[in-house]
Amino acid sequence: MKKVEDKIKEAQEIARQVEEALTKGNWEQVAPDSPYLHEEVGIPERLHENIKLHDSFDTEKALRTFISATRPARRFPVLYKYVAAVACFLIFGIGYYLYQSTSSSTGKTELMAKSAYLILDDGRQVDLSRQVQLDYNGTRIINSDAGKVSYQKAQDSPSTSPNKLIVPEGTEYSLQLSDGTNVHLNAGSTLVFPSTFDNASRVVELSGEAYFEVTHSGVPFIVKSNVMNVKVLGTTFNMTAYPGDPTATTTLLTGKVAVTCHTPSDTLGQTTVLTPGLQACFHVQENILKVDSVDTAERIAWTRGEFAFEDVELGRIMTIIGRSFALDVVFDNPELKDIKCFISIQRDKGYNEILKILHLATGVKFKKEGNEIRVYK
């Protein structure tokens, strides 16, 4: 207990130092060796505003509330004392709000509300909510209870019949392709792939989001989507290409990839090559391709069952939460979509707890009505 009290006192002292630094206009003196503090805390002027408005704020209570409501801080390259300070700042000026809901269910029941399924080339549907072992066109399809279906080449076959894995909103699923490549699909995603790859190409089509661990081969592995194509030989990367989203992204963890982006009216497209730690982001309406360094751990947090957002608009956050729990989201005021925040919380906490944390971080309110989440002030 003394250790916790010491950390609270340390956080209070850091908060005092930050306020003093901001008052004097010397933000850099707070953490001269930590460029990440700016990203963790946010806009200095906004933080200063909050501090001045809440001089009598109970930082000890705020820190206890934050720690009890969320998991321990993620693996950011920031010293503990600054994370503790940020925990206090997150709660400044925000009253606790009991989320109104007509449903009390939480956890994995919400996440796994629907089952993934396969569609084979003859139109047959294979339910993946049960164990499956199926010999089909020279391929053995095996589905266990571990949330993963695998394609194993059982014999030489000229057939490369197309298959489709559909992962509805509210669930996730993993797939092992016949070449050993592993694919983890996020909620509301679809992957079209051949039962076996031939010797000339390895091509799949993605709608949604997936994390790929591509088996190395001299045959290129190509992921196609409506606006972005990725070509690799063997690597790990995350790709997001949901129809209707304003952006499509590819984030590279290891190896090297070539990314080509295009719109229906732009047949030439734009191409870039990524090295580890870079993300290609294609803005569809503007037809602009941007490449930036990113926190790859945050970008693939969903594969660890975690929501992790840094300075992300609430509209984007709620789109992801809606897909993950198969819920519709409606904003009373479109301006609320532009509010930015950062949170990190395990997805199996359930949407009730996640929305409580979002309220703490933004002051925005949420109400569940049927299958719809209403967002309002």
Image (spheres, rainbow, N blue to C red):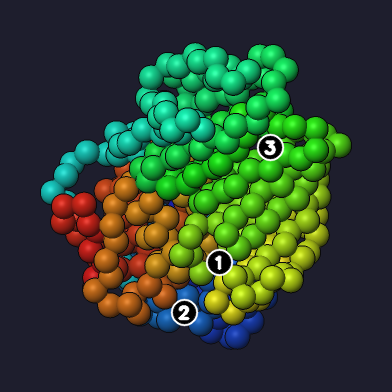
Q: Is residue 92 visible?
A: no
Q: Residue at x 45, y 16 (%)?
A: 132
In depth, the one of 93 and 56 nearer the eye is 93
Closer to the chain start, of discs 1 and 3, is: 3
Residue placed under numbered mark 3 in the picture: 213
Q: Secondary structure at mark 2?
A: helix
Real-space Cα separation, disc 1 to disc 3, in angstroms:
22 Å
Can you tell which quarter of the image residue 201 is in? top right
- Residue reaching furthest to the left: 102
Image vertical order of residue 44 relative to residue 354, above or below: below
Q: Residue at x 27, y 48 (%)?
A: 352
Residue 361's mark?
none
Residue type at the position of mark 1:
Thr
Residue placed under numbered mark 2 in the picture: 46
Sort mark 3 into few (<14), some (14-19) or many (20+) by Cα contacts within 10 Å. some
Real-space Cα separation, disc 2 to disc 1, in angstroms:
28 Å
Residue type at the position of mark 2:
Arg
